[in-house]
Structure formats: structure tokens, C-alpha cells
Image (cartoon, helix red, strand yellow):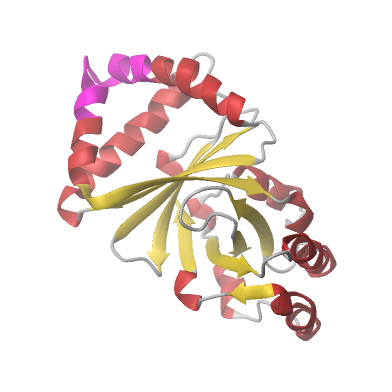
Amino acid sequence: MKHILTILLTFTFSLASSQIYTSRTIEVHDGKMNEFIKMAGKKTKMFNNNGEGPAYSTFEILSGANSGKIFRVQIASPEQMDGELATKDELQYWEKNVVPLIKDNDSSRTIMWVRSAETSFVPEIATDNDLRQVLFYNYKTSHEQDFWRFRQRQAKAWAAMESPSDSAMNVMVCQSGCNGNVVAIFFSYENYQGQNEVESEGLPKMVEKYNELFGEESYEQDSSKVNESLVQGGRTRIHMRLIREATTD
């Protein structure tokens, strides 16, 4: 259970573990968010804290087209996905206490993800943060090599720094439910001030290390190729906040 908690709070997912992360974007009825969090949280604590079945992580979307909606993630092994993901009592509780609070739970917004371990970076001492900045990319298949070269090199640069940021960077690859080659990169921060510090102080140092490792001006050249690799409108940035009350302990 302690391992699951680490997974949920930092998105430190391991591709080698073959875990599957199924996300849903849920719209709650106006004025019912607090009740939704209470009821979904009670369900999570009652049925998803024993370490035997899937775990859940719940976020509130703070910006973008889905601002004010819920982003709920189920974390399960392939074996769990092949079996019963929920008990009868669990399903009945959700239907009775949570579903009436939901305005829209369109299945077209259900997506399955896996983590790219080699392009992610988690510091040895990861801060237990609630704020997430999420960057969504949609790249052209013809430019796949350019996109992933930059992501691999950036992860290596962060890891090679003497004093890397305490912000985790986890790269999630869409396996089902997306239109095109969709990648979501989750950055964790203590708060907005913490994000500003990482971007104003840590990012320039990472760029310096990147160029040191891979050649002068390589960061600028590689990032330019990434820009060219994206489809039109293939870059989106949003923020989310972890809702601990409705997240597996």
C-alpha cells in the first residue's frame, strides 16, 4: 500500500510494472462538488485502500476547456484489468451515492495510459506535492524520433544535475482512447510559487546541463524539432490539484 501511495501522489509510474492507468473526465452537477468529493472519497477509503484491487487518484482540473471538472485515475495491473475491477458492493455504493452527483460522464473521455520510464524523472527525494502542471502533446508519426529524442535527453539532463529540482516529471503515453500520438507530461509542484521557482531557476540549469551532455545549442535544436513534430494544435497546457480526500491512501 505504501508503494501505491507513492505512485498516486507523485505519478511515479513504472512501465516495467505494466500498470495501466485509466483516466476519466467527470463533470459534476453545479453546487455538488463538495458532496461529490465526500462521497467519492468515502467510496475510495471503503473499497480501494486494501491494496488488493485497483487504486484511485482524483484531481480537480483548474484550467482549460475542462476547468472545474474531475480527472479520476484508476491504477490497475493487467491481471486486475482481466478480472473483476470492482466488487458488487463497491459498484452499488457508487451507483447510489456518487452517480446522482454526476452531470456528465461521457465514455469518450475515458483514456488508458502507460508510463514511459526512460523519459520520466523523479528525484530521489520527491516532495509530496498536490499541484500538477500537465502538458499534452500530439505528434506526427513521421517525426516520432525527434519527439522522443528530446524527451529522453531532457530526462537524462535533469538526472545529471548536481541539485535537480524536487519536482517530478512523469511522461504518460496514451495507449487507447486518443486521436493520434498523444503524450501527457505531469509536473508536480508544491504550489504556483514552487512552479515559478523551478521554471525560473531549475529550468535554465537543466538547459545548461542538456547542452553540456549533448552538444552546444543541442537543446535549442532539439526543442525546435519537437515543435515541428507536432500536429496543428498539438500542444495544450493545464493545471490540476490532487484531491487527497478522494485518493487511495
In this rendering, position of residue 123 left or right of residue 201: right
Q: Nearer the viewer, residue 248 or 161?
A: 248
Q: Which residue is at 65% across, 31% downward?
A: 190
Q: Quadrant of residue 213?
A: top left
Q: How many marks?
A: 0
Q: Quadrant of the N terminus?
A: bottom right
Q: Quadrant of residue 148?
A: top left
- 247 sits to left or right of 117: right
Q: Is residue 176 above or below residue 94?
A: above
The image position of residue 8, as x and y in percent, is 65, 50
Segment colored magenta: 207-222
- In the picture as drawn, the residue positioned furthest to the front comes out as 30
Q: Is residue 213 magenta-colored? A: yes
The residue drawn where x is 50% and y is 13% is 162
For residue 230, side relative to residue 183 (left or right):
left
- Percent from the top left, x then y, of residue 132? 57, 41
Q: Indicate whether residue 165 is drawn in magenta.
A: no
Residue 94 location in percent, x, y?
75, 77
Instruction: Give 190 or 86, whichever is nearer the viewer.
Output: 190
Q: Can you say whether 13 is above or below 120 in the image?
A: below
Left/right of residue 121 with respect to residue 104 in the rendered view: left
Question: As rendered, which of 118 and 60 lies closer to the eye?
Answer: 60
Q: Residue at x 45, y 75 (%)?
A: 108
Secondary structure, magenta segment, majority class: helix
Where does the image place residue 238, in percent across and percent down from the top left? 48, 46
> Does 31 sit above or below residue 13?
below
Residue at image coords 62%, 80%: 83
